[in-house]
Image: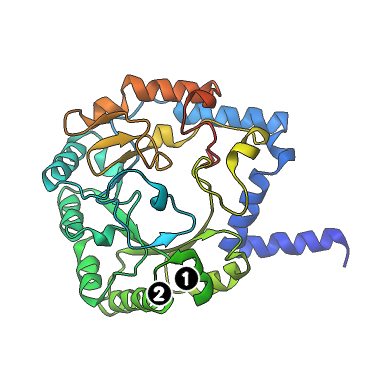
Amino acid sequence: MDLKHVWYEKIKKCLRNRYYLRKLIKKIQVTPWLMNNRLYCNIYNNRIKYMIKEPLTQIPEFINIEATNACNAGCVMCTHSIMKRKAGFMDSRLFKKIIDEISYLKNSNKTSIGLNNIGEPLMDPYIIERVKYIKGRGLKVTFYTNASLLNKESSLVLINSGIDKIGFSLDAFMKRTYERIRRGLNFEITLNNILQFLTLRKKLSKNRPEVIITLIKMKENYNELRRHFIRWKSLVEDVVISDVHDWAGRIKVNGVNSPDIAPQIKRWPCRDLWENLIILYNGDVVPCCVDYDGEMILGNLSKDSLKKIWQGEKLQIMRQLHLNREFNKLPVCKNCLKHRSWW
């Protein structure tokens, strides 16, 4: 079989399979020959200009509210173990104030509320009430959980709560690999909790919440990706496999730290600055999840409005620095390799 035919077969396989198609697209997008191609760079720059030319919306497309930063796991790819902030839970009055403000703003029905940041949402004793309050205001809500604390009772309540999407983080196909990555958790318990949730949803004849299985790809689980995808593809709505990142050089993953390789990678303005905000449990607002310790605080929602922060001077300065490729002037951004494509 000649080389041309081999590549033809690979492309056909990718087009038939969402996992392989995503894998192919991601691989192409970060190849040096494409990233350094003048024509592609011009096209990509025009794409960015097109995406941000509209007047800035009153609120971002995605808002992640940190209901809690407490967690019951010690994952190897997470900064929770080095986080300086104390564990805590968002005050219910502050939470309702934030949700009420969002619901009153124009186009709030297009905004998706996530109940995640650094922490396990099922550790929050008020998580179900928070979900119901968000749905009562006509907003979309989702969260991601390691599923270790899920049980039959909480599964039934969640399924009937109206939550739009729930993501289960399961970072391996094999028990030994899973427990090496998600330290402190038990593979069989987590697996059975997820399967029980799916069984209950089917028995209740519900098509909501949409269920996603997520996996962070790293050297520990790389050889299990295909088996993991095959196991879940027919059981859930989507299987998402994302690349590990090193939190702007704060932790070591796959033997690589970003300060060593960031200068070699072509940088683009971060899409999150135009689409996303993180609200920490004390009301502080930060630009993205990489700022897990609140180094670049944009304001606090106990005294500032969300619209004011989103359209405010601090965030506008950050956006302009990104457009000017002056990443080094921002402490969290200068070594960050986390990238959302503008396509």
Above or below 8: residue 98: above
In the figure, is residue 323 to the left or right of 40? left
Q: Are marks 1 and 2 in contact (CB under 8 Å)?
A: yes
In the rendered image of this protein, does residue 183 appear above or below residue 99?
below
Q: Which amino acid type corresponds to the residue marked 1 in the rendered image?
A: Glu
- Residue 64 in percent (x, y) is at 32, 45
Question: Which residue lies at the image location 31% right of the left edge and 24% below the top edge?
Answer: 311
- Measuring 65% from the left and 54% from the top, which residue is drawn there? 24
Tag 2, which secondary structure? loop
Q: Earlier in the sequence, mark 1 or mark 2?
A: 1
Q: Residues within 10 Å of mark 1 (few under 14, many from 20)?
A: some
Which residue sits at x=20%, y=63%?
161
Q: Secondary structure at mark 1?
A: helix
- Identify the residue under disc 1: 179
Q: In terms of depth relative to the viewer, which is nearer, 240 or 257?
A: 257
Instruction: Please state the horizontal and vertical placement of residue 339, each as a whole percent of the image.
Output: 53, 41
Residue depicted at 13% across the width and 48% down the height: 92
Q: Quadrant of residue 105?
A: top left
Q: Which mark is residue 186?
A: 2
Q: Point out residue 72 in the picture as x, y percentages from the top left corner.
A: 33, 62
Along the line of sight, the residue nearer the viewer: 155 or 80: 80
Quarter the N terminus occupies = bottom right
Q: Is residue 54 above or below residue 136?
A: above
What quarter of the picture does the C terminus occupy? top right
State which quadrant residue 211 falls in.
Answer: bottom left
What's under tag 2, amino acid-wise? Asn
